[in-house]
C-alpha cells in the first residue's frame, strides 16, 4: 500500500471482482485466486531483490564503486517521488492521465474516490498477498531455494540450441 503497484493491482483486482459479480461465472473466482498468488510472487521477488541486493554484506570487489552521477540520482529521485505520489493520490493521476483517454474513446468515466483504493477489501487482499509472499520468501531463503538450479537439459535454452544445431546440420549437409 501507498505505492503505485498497490494502486494498479487494486484496479485490476476490482475489475476481476466487478466482472465476477456481473457475469456470475466460476472462472472469475479462479482468476481472483491466481491474481492473489501472482501478487504474492511479486512481493516475494521484490523481497528477494531488496534483501539480496541492498541488505547483504558488500563483496570486496564492489567496495571501490563510486556514487552514481548526479543526473542519475535526480532521475531516480523524480521516479521515486512519482511512485509515492501515485500511491498517495491515485485519483489525481487517474483524472490527469486516464480520463482523457476514456473520453477520447467515448468510454464511461468513473472517478473512484480515495476510499475505492483504501477500503477494507483492498487492504485485506494486500495483507493476504504480502503475508503469503513473505512466507514464500522466508521459506525460500531458509532452505536456499532461490539458489537451486535445475539440470541444464530441463531448460528452454538447451532445447533451442539442439534445434538450431540440427537445423545447421541439415543446411550444411
Image (cartoon, rainbow, N blue to C red):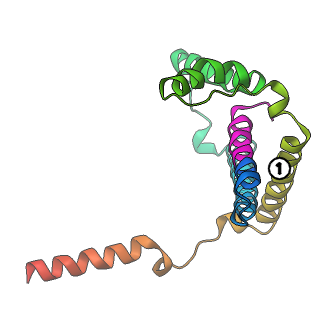
Residue at the extreme right of the image, as rendered:
120
User: Does residue 105 appear in the picture of this structure?
Assistant: yes
Q: Is residue 101 above or below residue 163?
A: above
Q: Quadrant of residue 55?
A: top right
Q: Position of residue 74 (x, y in %)?
A: 58, 16
Residue in front for this viewpoint, 68 or 103: 103
Instruction: Name the residue located 70 percent from the left edge and 24 percent from the top edge.
Output: 86
Quadrant holding the N terminus: top right
Q: Is residue 166 magenta?
A: no
Residue at the extreme left of the image, as rendered:
173
Instruction: Name the residue located 79 percent from the left edge and 25 percent from the top edge.
Output: 113
Q: Is residue 163 above or below residue 83?
A: below
Q: Is residue 24 above or below residue 109?
A: below
Q: Position of residue 6 (x, y in %)?
A: 74, 38
Instruction: Name the residue located 61 percent from the left edge and 17 percent from the top edge.
Output: 96
Q: Quadrant of residue 120?
A: top right
Residue in front for this viewpoint, 95 or 161: 95
Quadrant holding the C terminus: bottom left
Instruction: Name the residue located 76 percent from the left edge and 56 percent from the top edge.
Output: 36
Q: Is residue 3 magenta?
A: yes
Residue 19 in the figure: left or right of residue 101: right
Q: Is residue 93 above or below residue 52?
A: above
Label 1 crowd (10 A; few <14 / some 14-19 / many >=20): some
Q: Position of residue 67 (x, y in %)?
A: 59, 24
Give the SS element for disc 1.
Answer: helix
User: Does residue 56 appear in the picture of this structure?
Assistant: no
Return the residue at label 1.
Answer: 130
> Magenta stretch mostly in which secondary structure?
helix
Residue 16 in the figure: left or right of residue 70: right
Q: Which residues are magenta?
A: 1-15
Residue in front for this viewpoint, 89 or 84: 89
Amino acid at each position: 500500500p501507498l505505492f503505485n503497484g498497490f494502486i494498479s493491482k487494486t484496479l485490476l483486482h476490482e475489475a476481476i471482482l466487478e466482472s465476477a459479480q456481473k457475469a456470475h461465472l466460476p472462472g472469475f473466482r479462479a482468476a481472483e485466486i491466481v491474481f492473489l498468488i501472482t501478487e504474492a510472487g511479486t512481493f516475494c521477488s521484490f523481497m528477494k531483490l531488496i534483501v539480496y541486493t541492498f541488505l547483504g554484506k558488500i563483496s570486496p570487489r564492489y567496495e571501490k564503486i563510486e556514487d552514481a552521477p548526479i543526473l542519475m540520482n535526480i532521475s531516480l529521485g523524480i521516479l521515486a517521488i512519482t511512485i509515492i505520489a501515485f500511491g498517495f493520490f491515485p485519483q489525481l493521476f487517474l483524472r490527469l492521465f486516464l480520463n482523457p483517454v476514456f473520453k477520447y474513446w467515448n468510454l464511461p468515466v468513473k472517478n473512484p474516490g480515495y476510499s475505492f483504493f483504501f477500503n477494507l477489501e483492498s487492504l485485506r487482499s494486500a495483507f493476504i498477498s504480502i503475508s503469503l509472499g513473505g512466507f514464500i520468501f522466508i521459506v525460500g531463503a531458509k532452505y536456499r531455494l532461490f539458489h537451486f538450479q535445475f539440470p541444464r537439459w530441463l531448460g528452454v535454452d538447451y532445447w533451442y540450441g539442439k534445434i538450431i544445431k540440427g537445423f545447421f546440420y541439415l543446411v550444411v549437409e
